[in-house]
Amino acid sequence: MVKIKIWFFTGLVFSFLLSGCSWFVTRKEADQMKIRVEKISEELKQRRKEEKVFGEAIVNAKKELSKVSEARERYRKEQTAFIRKVHLLLSKLNVNIRTFEVNLASLKKKVDKTLKKEVEEIETIFKERAAELQELGKKFNLLIANYIKDSPQKFLKYYKAFAVAKEWKSLNRHLALMKLKYPSSNEMEEGLIFALKKLNEAKEYGKVIIYCGLYRRLFSQGPHYPLSLLMEAEAKYAIMNCSDAIKLLEEFSKKFPNHKQFSKVKKLQQDISSKLHSKMYCAK
């Protein structure tokens, strides 16, 4: 059947090509025509195969396009549902925020009122306690005045005796009593300097530092103020607190450039500054 169609098609083509010409052709021309017809037939077969493949590809593309459309529709629905959910949550959040703001404002008023009341009560208590402390201070001073009968000269005598004997606890106890009774007396100043020299000789550097600071607080214009700076600087250098020692020596140099110990201070300052200081042992 296929061969008949091919020959029929070949005849039509042959007749078309030879229209207007002679009805008689040579064998060679007939063979060439047959080859041409077969070639055209093969091309038609190949074209049909390509059209079939192309058609299948179109069908597959339509299927994939359908899947993409379905996925897109599902995504759109999911996004719509998500946006609605977010809007709902935002609405609830706004309501909660407004409620919180109202509660916060109410609480702030309540706290301000309560806090103001408590502050007023505390202020009243502090005033009462301050008055009580003032009264207690007066009674304490009166008690000290009645209890301590010794004169400052007698205190100084005891004080020097304890310093010479290196009875440091008794020395501290009498110093405290003397400070309460005669804080700005000449005997107090003389006793402090005497004790400082004995403590320094005994290498009680911690006590030297405390007593020097006490002297400068009680006698900020005292004649031994420069000496207290020098002795405290030496004590701090001895315990390797080099930075504080240098500060004290600098204060001495600045305030007392004409003092007889000035050259000693500058030499000590140069000695400390020229040394290599350990981060582990030297205080910063």
Image (cartoon, grey):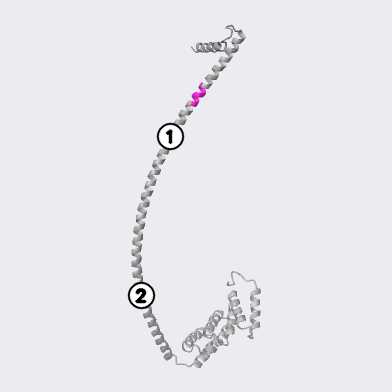
Tell me if residue 217 is in the magenta stretch.
no
Q: Main secondary structure of the magenta part?
A: helix
Q: Residue 78: x, y in percent?
A: 39, 42
**Circle 2: is it few (<14), some (14-19), or many (20+) Cα within 10 Å?**
few
Residue 120's disc number: 2
Q: Residue 72: x, y in percent?
A: 42, 38
Question: In the figure, is residue 97 to the left or right of 159?
Answer: left
In the rendered image of this protein, does residue 44 appear above or below residue 98? above
Q: How many marks?
A: 2
Question: In the figure, is residue 236 to the left or right of 90?
Answer: right
Regarding mark 1 in the picture, which secondary structure is present there?
Answer: helix
Q: What is the magenta range?
A: 48-54
Residue at the outermost top position:
24
Q: Of 163 and 60, which appears nearest the observer?
A: 60
Q: Please state, as top left, top right, bottom left or bottom right, where the C terminus lies in the image.
A: bottom right
Q: Amino acid at mark 1?
A: Lys
Q: Of 6 and 215, which appears nearest the observer?
A: 6
Residue 253's disc number: none
Residue at the spot 34% in from the left edge and 70% down from the top edge: 113
Question: In the figure, is residue 227 to the left or right of 154?
Answer: right
Question: In the figure, is residue 241 to the left or right of 152?
Answer: right
Q: Residue 115: x, y in percent?
A: 36, 70
Asked whether residue 240 appears in the rendered view, the answer is: no
Q: Earlier in the sequence, mark 2 or mark 1?
A: 1
Residue at the spot 35% in from the left edge and 58% down from the top edge: 98
Asked whether disc 2 touches disc 1, contact meaning CB atoms under 8 Å apart, the reply is no
Residue 67's disc number: 1
Q: Amino acid at mark 2?
A: Glu
Q: Of 207 and 30, which appears nearest the observer?
A: 30
Regarding mark 2 in the picture, which secondary structure is present there?
Answer: helix
